[in-house]
Amino acid sequence: MNFDQLDLIQPIRRAVADAGYTAATEIQAKAIPHILKGKDILGCAQTGTGKTAAFAIPILQQLQATQPQPSRIRALVLTPTRELALQIEESFNTYSKYLGIRNLSIFGGVPQGKQVTGLKKGVDILIATPGRLQDLMQQGYINLGSIEILVLDEADQMLDMGFVNDVKRILTHIPVSRQTLFFSATMPKAIRKFANTILNQPVEVSVTPVSSTAQTVQQSVYFVEKKEKPGLLIHLLNDRSIARSLVFTRTKHGADKLVKQLGQKGIFAAAIHGNKSQNARQRALEDFKSSRIRVLVATDIAARGIDIDELPYVVNYELPNVPETYVHRIGRTGRAGKEGVAVSFCGSEEQEDLQNIQKLIGFRMPVKASITNSRQLMNL
């Protein structure tokens, strides 16, 4: 469906066109008309399908159509990580280019001064992580009594990260009479149960099975023991035709250690995880996006905020022990119809994880090779 068919106001159509978008994605085409009618939404779609625009565009149109309320926050988007907050703010800024609507993101890990200054100037749409939002509410900088639209984005990750009680406390400060948009990449029973407590006769929008991986991603696995993984990764990354590679580890320590090992072999990389400062994380992302570095090593907590065009290569250096996380990881590549490659390393202690992943996605990944010693790397 073309964006011109979605009954959008001219300033938004113009901003969307400036951004280079013509056709709406499936989640956008299905969700936007219902949101414009004021309906609550229970939306499920895998990463990379355009969920942010699916709620940002109609929210902007609804706020533009009603009387502005100076110094009152009218829409709140709750999201689990700093990276996602910044990404969502960037999207709102893109689509509100020709509107007088003010957007601001707030998140922890950085001094609050600039965020407080932004709040004092007045904000229509606030994008926030739960912890920083509660901090600034307690200090008296934020009042949620005028919220008309509430969005919970990446709700499954937010609850997995232990934010459920924070979200419940925040909800007590928001008017019961509101529109609520609930978006999640997966919809297990616990998430659906929670959604049902905060939604009012929602329209359910699901565009892909939650267990599916994009057909544009070529998936494969290497059977390789833990001690041989660094050598195999270095061998693969020595292929200079791979412009950028995103590598996933399970732990922050593992990410930092891997960056050092790669650097010793002349492969310059950066790590992004929860222990890094906000400035360090943003610098690493910018260096990666601009190709100043070819390799970014990330933990899962940082992964969903990574939205990079033309990311051709994802490596699961360590398999996740939650199968759905695999879907999120490889969803970083093969986006917007482009081709991508996802390679997984599986050690003997990860066999069960691999079986669970393959059961979820519905097929067995082709095996590239079995590596038991460094000599075998020479024959790849």
Image: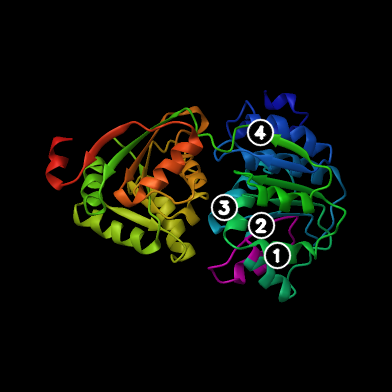
Residue 210 left/right relative to 225: right
| Amino acid type at image mark 1 | Leu
**Residue topped by disc 2:** 104
Residue 114 left/right relative to 354: right
Magenta-colored stretch includes residue 128: yes
Say which of marks 3 and 1 sits in front: 3
Looking at the rendered image, the quarter that the C terminus falls into is: top left
| Amino acid type at image mark 4 | Ile
**Residue topped by disc 4:** 27
Say which of marks 3 and 2 sits in front: 3
Disc 2 element: strand
Please report the residue visible at 40 percent of the width from the left and 60 percent of the height from the top. 251
The dot on residue 119 is: 1
The residue lying toward the viewer, choosing from 29 and 365, is 365
**Residue topped by disc 3:** 84
* Residue 225 percent location from the top left of the image: 25, 49
